[in-house]
Image: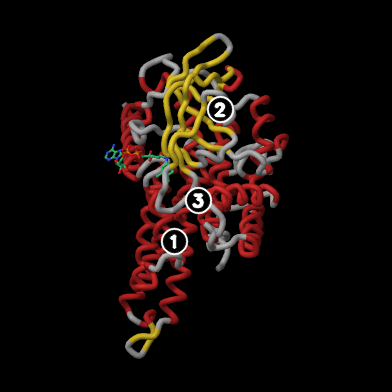
Amino acid sequence: MPSSPHLDWPFFEARHKSLATELDRWASANLPHDHESSVDDACRGLVRQLGAAGWLNHAIAGTAYGATSEAIDTRAICLIRETLARHSGLADFAFAMQGLGSGAITLFGSAAQKKKYLPRVAEGEAIAAFALSERNAGSDVAAMQCEARRDGDAYILNGDKTWISNGGIADFYVVFARTGEAEGSRGVSAFVVDSDTPGFKLGERVEVIAPHPLARLVFENCRVPSTQLLGEAGRGFKVAMATLDVFRTSVAAAALGFAQRALAEALSRATSRKMFGQTLADFQLTQAKLAAMATEIDAAALLTYRAAWLRDQGQSVTVEAAMAKWSATETAQRVIDSAVQIFGALGVVSGSVVERLYREIRPLRIYEGATEVQQLIIARGIIKAFQDAGSSRG
Ligand SMILES: Cc1cc2nc3c(=O)[nH]c(=O)nc-3n(C[C@H](O)[C@H](O)[C@H](O)COP(=O)(O)OP(=O)(O)OC[C@H]3O[C@@H](n4cnc5c(N)ncnc54)[C@H](O)[C@@H]3O)c2cc1C
């Protein structure tokens, strides 16, 4: 499997190229295609393995805490996810959650909070999670009901969170709860809740088509010291959105990795499968499929690395990240579906690579903002830009 095919594009610096090439080599030598142990043990093992090899140093920022760079390097995170996803969906998941789960601490944490959590995240010693969604507040995040009431030098959390990745194996959770400073999204705050905090417990586990730890979390009079508040009270929505601006783009990169793997598998199968006196790849109908797969992957990759590069230049990328996530996840779904078709019956045999990819890609079109939510973000952004340009013209 080649390392990222886009490394010569102008978005990258020399360090990105060597990072992606080294990781590809490491992943080929160290990551199994299938994980024999339970999904929890496999994830714990992957976090330790990624930490020991130094890859998690890219999931956080701040060299004082063990990071490779002072600021989040979005392109590095994207290249790592793309590469890991090509090799192992679970390894990509383990890396992504260390970043998403600690991203709010990197971006908004106090020096004490960073010192407490980030080095352990980078070493793979502490597992991180991000708890925003609730049963009745998924796309409509502002409808969240989990609440945190101020009580002296602490907050008392009550409510639940659902669909939480790493639920059950995380050592800490970044939790968003309503603190009531204002209605809707302006009355939400973010907290870091350690998994051994009294009043925090695990609800039921949720089994999904591409297995990974996922659970409902329950907070019952869970007392969290106010030193665990992340950023300002009432500004938790901003914390969540800024974190998602980084990691949404990286979801696009993971989708690219899955799609590239599917294209590589499809090329290998189509050029070797004999039928009607030639190979499957000799048929123009197959060639049209392969051409569409390759072209759509490149188009999505351009959007993805544009968003990553812009963010690394310090620009706001809400619209660009939404374009990248929408385009790359929908593209990857189509590409993987074409790969399954090219494999015929073999493509739906449990455990085959394309069958695994077919299951792994599906949730990416739903989490961190479903496709329709990305479309709305893009439309809102371009309409506002158009109106602002109109008012400045007078
Ligand atoms: C595998 C997996 C892992 C996850 N991990 C986490 C996690 O770690 N932390 C966390 O906080 N959450 C997590 N989530 C939750 C995820 O973010 C939500 O599932 C997502 O935000 C969608 O919310 P929902 O499932 O409630 O769907 P709903 O909000 O009910 O939306 C259902 C569908 O409606 C459509 N839709 C939404 N808005 C609109 C609109 N305005 N117009 C038209 N159609 C619309 C979309 O197609 C959407 O899929 C995870 C989910 C999955 C599947």
Q: Amino acid at mark 1?
A: Arg
Tag nearer the camera, 1 or 3: 1
Q: Which mark is residue 75?
A: none
Please tell me whether residue 320 is drawn above or below residue 389 in the rendered image. below
Give the alpha-carbon distance from disc 1 to disc 3, as whole Å: 26 Å
Give the alpha-carbon distance from disc 2 to disc 1, as whole Å: 33 Å
Does residue 245 appear anywhere in the picture?
yes
Identify the residue under disc 2: 193
| Nearer to me, 389 or 219 | 219
Crowdedness of circle 2 by 10 Å Cα count: few (<14), some, many (20+)?
Answer: many
| Nearer to me, 145 or 64 | 145
Tag nearer the camera, 2 or 3: 2
Please tell me whether residue 144 is drawn above or below residue 6 in the rendered image. above
Q: Amino acid at mark 2?
A: Val
**Residue 289 percent coordinates (x, y):** 34, 70
Q: Is mark 3 within 8 Å of ligand 1?
A: no
Side of 328 where 201 appears, left or right: right
In which quadrant will I find the N terminus?
bottom right
Does residue 11 appear anywhere in the picture?
no
Identify the residue under disc 1: 356
Residue at the far bottom in the pictured view = 277
| Nearer to me, 348 or 250 | 348
**Residue 64 percent coordinates (x, y):** 72, 34
Crowdedness of circle 3 by 10 Å Cα count: few (<14), some, many (20+)?
Answer: many
Side of 22 where 253 appears, left or right: left
Lower sequence index among marks 2 and 3? 2
Instruction: Give the quarter the ligand 1 occupies.
Output: top left
Q: Quadrant of residue 280?
A: bottom left
